[in-house]
Amino acid sequence: MIYLHRETSGRNGTPVSLVKNLVLSAEDMKSLAKKLKQACGTGGTIKDGVIEIQGEHRQKISEILIKLGYKVKIAGG
């Protein structure tokens, strides 16, 4: 189960979509992050096994992950 969170703390109120609970190799994580950033048309990074995508894109990320066969839960704010 992958969790999608929105976080604004420590970012001057700018929302960031977090993709948590992924169990992937570093290479797969990089490729998934790249795919999500391109789909959302925005930047992002990987920190401590969590993919961070700039902006509020949980719905779009959720649709992409479901198409890839993951179970997704949108959590938080």
Image (cartoon, rainbow, N blue to C red):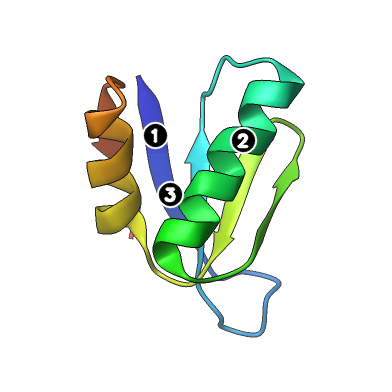
Q: Secondary structure at mark 1?
A: strand
Using the image, tell me which numbered label, if any, was put on residue 31: 2
**Circle 2 — which element?**
helix
Q: Amino acid at mark 2?
A: Ser
Mark with earlier residue (1, 2) = 1
Q: Earlier in the sequence, mark 3 or mark 2?
A: 3
The relative height of residue 22 versus residue 6 in the rendered view (above or below) is: above
The amino acid sitting under disc 1 is Tyr
Residue 68: where, in percent of width, then height? Answer: 31, 26
- Marks 3 and 1, how far apart at CA: 6 Å
5 lies left or right of 29:
left
Q: Circles 1 and 2: CB distance less than 8 Å?
A: no
> What residue does disc 3 label?
5
Closer to the eye: label 1 or 2: 2
- 63 versus 28 height, above or below: below
The reply to whether callout 3 and callout 1 are in contact (CB within 8 Å) is: yes
Q: Which mark is residue 3?
A: 1
Give the residue drawn at x 54%, y 36%.
Answer: 32
